[in-house]
Amino acid sequence: MSTEQSTDVVVIGAGAVGENAAARVVRGGLSAVLVESELVGGECSYWACMPSKALLRSGTALHAARSVAGAREAVTGALDTQEVLARRDSFTSHWDDSSQVDWVNATGITLLRGTARLTGERRVEVTTDDGVTTLTARHAVVLATGSVPSVPPIGGLEGLTYWGTREATSVKEIPESLTVLGGGVAGTELAQAYARLGSKVTLVARSALLGSYPEPAVRLVQQGLEHDGVTLHLNTTTESVAYDGGRFRVTLASDTVVESEKLLVATGRRPALAGLGLEGLGLETRQLDTDESGQVVTHPWLYAVGDAAGKVLLTHQGKYEARIMGDAVIARANGTLNGSPPKWSAFAATADVYAVPQVVFTDPEIAMAGRTLEAARKDGLNVSETSLELAVAGSSLHADGYEGWAQMVVDEDRKVLVGVTFAGPDVAELLHAATIAIAGEVPLERLWHAVPAYPTISEVWLRLLEKYGL
């Protein structure tokens, strides 16, 4: 059966980003159809952010208890694996999206389950179980299709049944051994999670661990992994992979062979743009050229947000882009926005360039906002660096033998922060203050008057500013 339907905005992809995009335009008075072929809520809800952090949290809480005298003496057992997995399942709603569907309906969004394909300007063909529905968007079509894993060209890997992050975060039993290919955030986090859940874990990375983060911060994470028994092969090429006798055999460039029950390939992700019909519109399927409102510059009716836009592959930034995009679509529909929006306006996702917050949820954590020293210099800024060990009264109280590190990067011409990094247990909760300081371009002379409470880990702000010279 074929049907046709018109709406103001069509959003393809009902993950966290697509949900925010559709909700924003509906809130602004437009109608929206949200198209999804899998679970409403997307990767983050069921296979990424939520389940991976749930797998990590129990081990972090146990380690924290063992880091404080008086508490450590009360802890006599190991992690209860089945309870950890059950708690993980609760955060994924047992892979049942009915509550998210209820939210979509209550918000006034029309949900259409099926596979979408662009067939022309503002036209989307959706194949459903009942036939084909052709949608015509009066104002915009939004791509919020997320990302898919990038598979490395390793001999023997093709055709094998190995884990991606989806399988690793939805597992029902913990393997006795696991080899992780990839030293990025996902690989590092999952390596530690599985080590603490009882697996013998080996991590192999063709470059350094967490290569986009400052080295002193990464060193603390590396020490944490090694303390948990993770074997690291860094700056190492994987030559081949084989599966024999119920075990994976990973051969490294050094002729070292790593054997394990399971293999996790976590070597990055790329925008999920294939199969959408972009070629028929004369567009690339690797990455789209969009302005800061998410509008595709050559096709002003088409938008891309979140991982699909390929700018910052982080859920919170994708949701931010979706809100910005929604407001821009509304403004253009009302005739109050023409052309590309000015930076830092309500219609420009400028923070994607200058003030991105990101956390590595290992134990210890890395929390970073803005740019590293190297990135700032590459951008042509006249910057200075101030760093120190995170050792204040608050950290000493937080855990016996607390180890941490902090750094701020200052634009010396404007005397504002352009980057901040913290490393240590529970530093993620320090991050929003840094994000505000960077996005708000708070002058250091004013930041000096933001007095941290005593005794908290936030005292590190005072120590950084003092070392800087204030």
Image: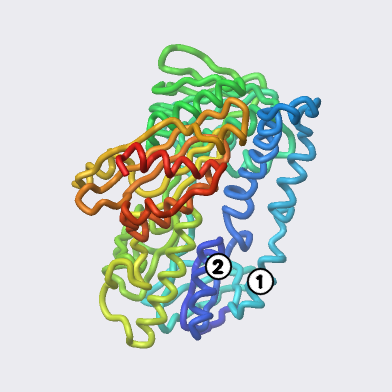
Query: Would you call the spot at circle 1 few (<14 residues within 10 Å), some (14-19), or many (20 or more)?
Result: some
Give percent across and percent down for residue 412.
22, 47
| Residue at horizontal 46 percent and vertical 69 percent from the top | 323
Name the residue that disc number 1 marks. 103
| Residue at horizontal 50 percent and vertical 37 percent from the top | 266
Q: Amino acid at mark 2?
A: Glu
Q: What is the CA distance from the residue labelled 1 to the residue labelled 2?
A: 9 Å
Is tag 1's residue or tag 2's residue first in the polypeptide sequence?
Answer: 2
147 versus 57 height, above or below: below
Left or right? Give the position of 278 relative to 27: left
Residue 224 visible somewhere in the drawing? yes
- Give the quadrant of residue 345: bottom left
Q: Exactly how many numbered labels are in the figure?
A: 2
Left or right? Give the position of 49 relative to 342: right
Residue 295 visible somewhere in the drawing? no
255 versus 237 height, above or below: above
247 versus 462 height, above or below: above
Give percent across and percent down for residue 470.
32, 44
Left or right? Give the position of 150 relative to 99: left
Give percent across and percent down for residue 348.
34, 68
Q: Nearer the viewer, residue 216 or 33?
A: 216
Q: Nearer the viewer, residue 302 or 312?
A: 312
Name the residue that disc number 2 marks. 19
| Residue at horizontal 46 percent and vertical 73 percent from the top | 124
Q: Amino acid at mark 1?
A: Trp
Quadrant, the N terminus: bottom right
Kindly check if marks 1 and 2 are in contact, taking CB atoms under 8 A apart as contact. Answer: yes
- Give the quadrant of residue 34: bottom right
- Give the quadrant of residue 440: bottom left
Q: Nearer the viewer, residue 185 or 376?
A: 376
| Numbered disc 2: secondary structure | helix
| Numbered disc 1: secondary structure | helix
